[in-house]
Image: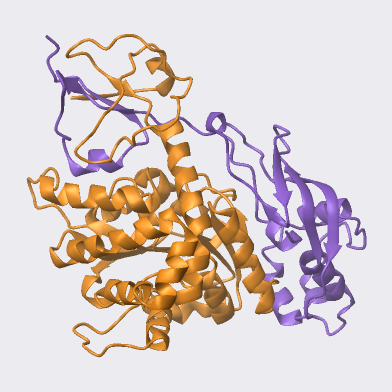
Amino acid sequence: MRLITHNMLSCNIKGVKNGFPLKIEAEKVIEKEVDFNPDFLRHMFAKIEWKALVEAARSMGYAELPEDSPDATVIESADETFLRKLHHALLELHLEEGALVCPETGRKFPVNKGIPNMLLHEDEVKQTVCIDLRKGNEPTRIRSPKDRVLMQDVCIDLSLQVP
Amino acid sequence: MKATLAPSSLISLPRHKVSSLRSPSLLLQSQRPSSALMTTTTASRGSVAVTAAATSSFEALREGIAEFYNETSGLWEEIWGDHMHHGFYDPDSSVQLSDSGHREAQIRMIEESLRFAGVTEEEKKIKRVVDVGCGIGGSSRYIASKFGAECIGITLSPVQAKRANDLAAAQSLSHKVSFQVADALEQPFEDGIFDLVWSMESGEHMPDKAKFVKELVRVAAPGGRIIIVTWCHRNLSPGEEALQPWEQNLLDRICKTFYLPAWCSTSDYVDLLQSLSLQDIKCADWSENVAPFWPAVIRTALTWKGLVSLLRSGMKSIKGALTMPLMIEGYKKGVIKFGIITCQKPL
């Protein structure tokens, strides 16, 4: 996982308000060279959450990025020193093994062979429950097609008679 | 009259195991022990019965989908390449296409979808794309290259994520695309970060269409576009409450082998998007444009190479292959539709 990806990932466990940025527990970091593409970096720069990137890079052992996000003149200038540092941090550092940690709950999302597993467990997901109303053994007719797809809330049809 | 209850207040309701439903729709048969949310008391005749649908069934479905694609992705890629979706063909094209013709059709499907959504004129604005249900990343890599954008793909299958990343590296696209294991119903992203939200033939796997659509909308940036291309069943007529039993039966048989939960119609998606106040909602029925696809897939399965690969790949692949004629039947009889639904999130 590279930091360009980490900069977008957040924790979505139910109830968590501040799931971004995920802290990094690095067990194995490797560096893979990538062709330098300043135009791509300039194109993407505005979308980067800077503090998150700086912190993440430090967790991966790279402390060359400035604390504060540089302004547009630095990005657009012909001097590519800064862009090269950005390039290295964003694209060339790979977290191969380790974990991403939710800043609010401490929950760890494992990273194996460079791939984060962001799947939530059963108890971390907002519960969705459906009710199938039965009279005897016959399922009731679904009242409208919308009922079949709208499963966020729990609905009970109170108009059915219970003998 | 309907009332809504918060899930927690249902804890004491009796649990009732569903043996079969007309459709696997609301509830999926649970193959695992029910979630601890429900206690067990006897369900009396006529009482309100509750099934532990969502959590444990969704987990079972999620695992089933992951295992299905873990097993079959390699086989698909060997024969069809890295796009795991239908090709787009001119209607009534009777020319039997070569392999490369079908691959071109798969690329055309991406281009036609982008064009339908009105995306092509806005290239500079697209910086970040999410591919929901990304397979081995064919769409992601294509779109990232096309727009010079960053694309992140999510899949339930670790095998697919790994292969997708390897292919990206091989194509020198690692700086632009990345893939992770995540659930489309719980996307691990902040709100509003993607200029383009792409779901190419993954919607049919989502057990909770409302939640699926809500997540797509949540992660879309203001002004961003959402493109859903998916298998649907035909729209119901006014007054029609459900599909005919024979139609439902056909879909049920397909659902089992492809790990699909309930089908919905294109109109259902439109309704959901309207309820979430999306703009510029468009939809189309592209069933005629994909008609050559399943016969072509079956033909490749019946080649010597196809059969050997199937046998090596495992039972899920074999069952999947045996189910393909049902897809053709479904299309021919107008039950199955290939739908595209696109919209834009308001600024």
Residue shown at 69% from the left, 71% from the top: B174
Residue B9 in which image quadrant = top left
Residue B324: x, y in percent? 29, 63
Of the 4 image quadrants, the one containing the C terminus of chain A is top left
Residue B43: x, y in percent? 27, 12
Which chain did the renderer colour orange?
A: B
Residue shown at 82% from the left, 66% from the top: A70
Residue A119: x, y in percent? 58, 43
Of the 4 image quadrants, the one containing the N terminus of chain A is bottom right
Colour chain A appears in: purple
Q: In front: A24, or B303? A: B303
Residue shown at 78% from the left, 65% from the top: A90
Q: Is residue B114 visible?
A: no
Please give left or right for residue A100 compared with residue B331 in the image. Answer: right
Q: Relative to B57, say whether B62 is above or below.
A: below
Residue B94 in which image quadrant = bottom left
State how many labels appear. 0
Q: Relative to A138, say whether A95 is above or below.
A: below
Q: Relative to A163, say whether A11 is above or below.
A: below
What colour scheme was applied to this rendering of the protein?
by chain
Q: In front: B72, or A157? A: B72
Q: Is residue B168 visible?
A: yes
Residue sitting farthest toward the left: B239
Residue shown at 66% from the left, 69% from the top: B166
Residue A129 in which image quadrant = top left
Q: In front: B314, or B199? A: B314
Residue B64: x, y in percent? 45, 46
